[in-house]
Image (cartoon, rainbow, N blue to C red):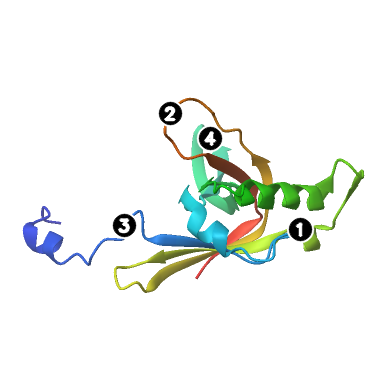
């Protein structure tokens, strides 16, 4: 194989850019619409997966084989807050529906877990990658610092999920 050269670099298609995406939540418990969460989401990451490693040791040699594909099953997204506090309210209501500390009750997973779509766009903007995050629900809405700076309030939300379909 020869060393890479300029012709190969010039033949590269336009790169995907880190800002060109949307997260689209299906309906969440306690919210009439989820559109606000789509445009309020300011950062996230593509959920990661790994292959388990299966080792076989025999005659003083260890061989490694690929095992099952597994998902990290935790995903984080950061949202900015608006003056009506609707961002945090959406997640607090979702928490309360999932497991109410006030009523000492809960809901079934089929009722509180949703599918979310992480859509990556090219410059047209056409969807070039669609990732469905299956059985998603919020585990934690993190704290935010309030101080004397001119910054927008943001909440990071840690979610649980079961797996990702890459379409």
Under circle 3, the secondary element is loop
Answer left or right for 38 relative to 87: left
Residue bearing the label numbered 3: 17
Is residue 127 or residue 56 the one in the foreground? 127
Under circle 4, the secondary element is loop
Q: Nearer the viewer, mark 1 or mark 4?
A: 1
Question: If you read the primary sequence from the N terminus, does the residue marked by circle 3 or circle 2 appear first?
Answer: 3
Q: Residues within 10 Å of mark 1 (few under 14, many from 20)?
A: many
Residue placed at 51% from the left, 31% from the top?
A: 60
Residue 73 seen from this side: no
Is residue 67 or residue 102 the one in the foreground? 102
Q: Residue furthest right?
A: 104
Residue bearing the label numbered 1: 112
Q: Residues within 10 Å of mark 4 (few under 14, many from 20)?
A: few
1 and 4 marks in contact (CB < 8 Å) = no
Residue bearing the label numbered 4: 59
Residue bearing the label numbered 2: 149
Structural distance between the alpha carbons of marks 3 and 2: 30 Å
């Amino acid at each position: 194989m020869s060393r890479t050269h300029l012709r190969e670099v010039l033949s590269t298609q336009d790169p995907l850019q880190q800002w060109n995406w949307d997260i689209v939540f299906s309906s969440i418990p306690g919210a009439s619409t989820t559109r606000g969460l789509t445009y309020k989401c300011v950062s996230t990451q593509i959920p990661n997966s790994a292959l388990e490693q299966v080792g076989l040791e025999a005659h003083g040699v260890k061989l490694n084989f690929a095992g099952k594909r597994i998902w990290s099953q935790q995903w984080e997204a950061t949202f900015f807050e608006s003056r009506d506090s609707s961002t945090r309210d959406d997640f607090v209501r979702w928490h309360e529906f999932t497991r109410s500390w006030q009523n000492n009750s809960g809901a079934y997973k089929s009722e509180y877990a949703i599918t979310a779509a992480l859509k990556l766009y090219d410059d047209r903007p056409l969807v070039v990658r669609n990732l469905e995050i299956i059985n998603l629900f919020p585990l934690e809405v993190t704290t935010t610092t309030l101080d004397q700076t001119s910054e927008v309030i943001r909440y990071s939300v840690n979610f649980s999920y079961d797996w990702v379909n890459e379409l």
